[in-house]
Structures are given as structure tokens and as C-alpha cells.
Amino acid sequence: MTAGPRPTDRSGDAARVPDYRPDPLRWKALWVTLTAGFMSLLDVSIVAVALPSIEHSLGASSAGVQWVVSGYTLTFGLALVPAGRLGDAWGRRRMFLIALAGFVLTSALCGAAPTLELLIVARLVQGFTAGMLAPQNSGLIQELFRGEERGRAFGLFGATVGLSTAVGPVVGGVILAVFGEPNGWRWIFYVNLPIGILALVLAVRLVPAVQPSAGGSVSRRLDLVGSLLLGGGVLALMFPLLDQERIARLWWLFPAAVVLLAGFARWESWLVRSGWREPLLNPRLLTNTPGYAFGAALGTTYFIGFSGIWIVLAMYFQSGLGYTPLQSGLAVTPFAVGSSASAVLGGRLTARFGRRLTVFGLCWVAVGLLGAAFVLGVYPGPSAGLWASVPMLVAGIGGGLVIPPNLTLTLSEVPVATAGAAGGALQTGQRVGAAVGTALLAGVYYTALSLTGQDAARSILAAMLCAVLFVLISLGIGLAELRRARVRGRNDD
């Protein structure tokens, strides 16, 4: 008996779709959608290494240029759940093509922006199109795959999520090194154009058009009130975290977020009871879908530590040790290599080991990041990145065994009819976690700098230990889910 839910069709998908026939082009379609998803997620982290170049090129302030990253993250998170639900109701292929076309167009606008203000506006719209794109990936996997194939597909999807975040600094550093100053940063956006156009052409040919499930008109299946409450809650939660200079003055947005999100939960529950309109996000996903609530909590907590380390490592290597953007990116390459090597394997092993695989991976991440923290804290010389390569490799191997299996286990039993909204909600948690982690770890790093007399080594040690703490919290959630699954398995027997 495995620990944790197996990525099979116990949710009843097979029963509800007795005439299911595998699409012969499903794997080719998956690679096209994953390529597009990789681009949209890569743009979260790839721009971070280019911020100094953008600042110099456009004559902008450090605070202003931060919104090139923050604005993208904000609108990305706002779009996820509504776009997922729209894909459920209107057709995921249609939403995927619209979102991908919008992403390519806004990438061109970002690259051509003559001023910081226009660049920020373009990034806001680009982030929204990326948020529209992301939940269609998980929804299309639910449509196109069943049984163990679904687990393998989710494994590849999870590998894409983890790898895109990890390799962003490396790819950004390489692009800046090739195209140089003062406008090399523009090619970070322009590189999306040929890849995106090719993906768009292939998607038209390969991604099948599956009719949305019946349930009334599209307008009846779209929950405008729920979208506004959830969007307002996510905005109130993320905005202060993304504007660190004014976070103390924006504290009131946090209780406002609690009120809005509580109102969203009550509204969705009322829609389920009354049957007046389909909810944006059915609360029964959390209560009746095995593993969904635990998986969402684990992913959100893990992303606090996982996403935050890239910003502070870039700060430490470039400002503390004088690395170039390329050298800074290469210093974290071992994590990307380890993650890519283990991610595909993790997707294949999920059906066999279940939640035990994520627990094992989290242990490796914690050990690797802890080792890297002490290496960087004890050896603050120019070779620090080299010395930290082995523990970063260990952490990367563990990371590849966390995100893909967690996505598979969390979404595998979600009904196809709500797959887009469920995937969007899961990724919203990850985006919120990433925003919290970026603000928190950067805050710890800067606070430590001021308290230690600008000692960068001790500051990176403090920030990395903070990241390890959240990885350990994720590990605790994974162990709790593992225990719950074992108890449920004994009761089923």
C-alpha cells in the first residue's frame, strides 16, 4: 500500500467520461503548452538579474525599477483563478491561444518600452496574460490524460514550474552577457517572441478543442462577485509585500485582505448551497478532494522559502561579492541542474511512493540549503559560489522531488470540470508564497546588513536560515498529510 493518494482516476473521471479515447497528439500538445508555461514562469525570475541594467538604461530609481518584477507578480496572481474558471467554462484551448498571443504581444511591448512608466504598464499587462495562461496547463492535462499518464504529465508540469524559477537568473545572466549594456535587458523580453510565435502556431495545430462541460450559459458559469472578492483579497495581501519601502504604511491592507477572503469563502459556500450560480472555486475542493488542502498549504509554504532565496542570493553575489550577473546566475546553476535531473524522475515515481516522495525531497532541500547557508556565511571569499555548489546541488535534487509530485498528488483527483480553477488556486497560493518569501527574505537580509555593520556573509546566513525554516514547516505539513493518508488507508482496509 502506498502512502498518499495515487494519481489515478478514483475521482471518477473515467466513470464520467466512459467514451474517453486518448488523443494521439496529446504528448506533443503537452510539450507545446509546457513551453509556453515555461516562458511565462521564467519571466518571474529572469528579470531580477537585469534590474541594475534597466535602472541605468532608463535612468530610474531602485524603488521604481522594482515594480518591473513586482507588477508582473501581482497581476499574475490576480488572474490565475478567474482565468482558470473561464477556461473551465469557455474552453481551455481557446483561453490558452488568447493568453499566449497576449503574452507574445506584451513581451514585444516590454522590450520596446522607452520609459520606465511604459515598461511597468507593459509588465502589468504581461503578468495578467501569463496568469491567464498558467491554469490552462493543468486543466489541459486533466482533459487529455488519465491514470498513470496523468501522473507523468503532471510530473513534467511540476518540473517546468520548479525549473523555470531556478534557471531564470542563469538565463538572464547569459542574455545580458551576450547583448551587453546599455540595452541588453531588452532581449530578455524579445527572446519570448520567436519561441512564443512558434508555440502559438504549433498550439493551433496540436492542442485539441475539447467542449466545456455542460452547465448553462457561460455567463451563468462565471462568478463575477467571487472574482471581485478574491481579486481584492489577493491584491490587498500581495501589494504591501511587493512594495517593501511602504509596507509599514500599508499594514491596514492585511486585515482588509482577511475580510475580503473571508467574504469570498462565505459567498462561495452560499453559491454551492443555493445552486444559483456555479462558484468560482468550489469549497468542496478543500474538504472533499483528498490531499488538495494539504498540497496547497505545502506548496504555498515551500514557495516562501524556495522563491525568496533567488533574490537574496543575487543581492549577496552581486553586491556583497562583486559578481557579474552571469557569474551570479552560474553560482546557482547547481540547483537548476539537480532540480532538472530529479524532477522528471519524481514525476515517474509519484504513483509508487506518493507523499513519501515529497517528504524525502523536502529533507534534501532543507539539508542542502542549510549547508549552503553555512558555507556562504563562513567563507565570504570570491570562491564562495564554488564552495556552495555541492550543497546547492543537493538542495536542487530535493527540489525536483517536491514540486512535481506535490502538483500531481494535489491535482490528480480534482474533477475535470473544475480543473482550471483548482490549478489556478494552487498556483495563486504559490504566487502569494513567492511574494511573501521575496519580501521576507530580502527584509531579513537588509535588516541583518544594518545590524552587522554591512556584513554580507552574516546577512546571507540569516536569510538562508529563514528559508530553511519555511522548508521545515512544509516538511511538517507533508508528514501530517502522510500520517492522515495512512490512517485513511487503514480505515479503507
Image: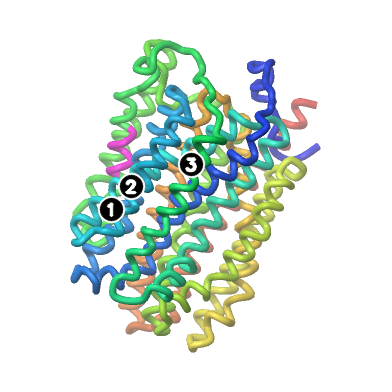
Count residues near mark 2 (Cα–Cα under 10 Å), then give few for <14, some for 14-19, many for 20+. Answer: some
* Crowding at mark 3 (Cα within 10 Å: few <14, some 14-19, many 20+): few
For label 3, the residue is 201
In percent of width and height, residue 272 lies at 43, 16
Q: Nearer the viewer, residue 59 or 320?
A: 59
- Assess whether residue 381 is covered by the magenta stretch: no
Residue linked to disc 2: 105
Q: Is residue 368 left or right of residue 469?
A: right
Residue 133 location, x and y as percent? 43, 40
Kindly identify the amino acid type of the residue bearing the numbered disc 2.
Answer: Leu
Amino acid type at circle 3 is Val
460 left or right, relative to 185: right
Q: Is residue 124 above or below residue 231?
A: below
Q: Secondary structure at mark 3?
A: helix
Magenta span main SS: helix
* CA separation in Å, label 3 and label 1: 20 Å
Disc 1, SS: helix
Left or right of 238 in this view: 143? right
Q: Which residue is mark 1?
A: 109
Find out whether the residues at labels 1 and 2 contact each other: C-beta distance under 8 Å. yes
Q: Which residues are magenta?
A: 230-236
- Name the mark nearer the viewer: 3 or 1: 3
Residue 247 visible from this viewpoint: no
Secondary element type, mark 2: helix
Report the residue that reaches farthest toward the bottom.
Answer: 381
* Amino acid found under the numbered disc labelled 1: Leu
Q: Nearer the viewer, residue 124 or 115?
A: 115
Q: CA distance from mark 2 to mark 3?
A: 14 Å
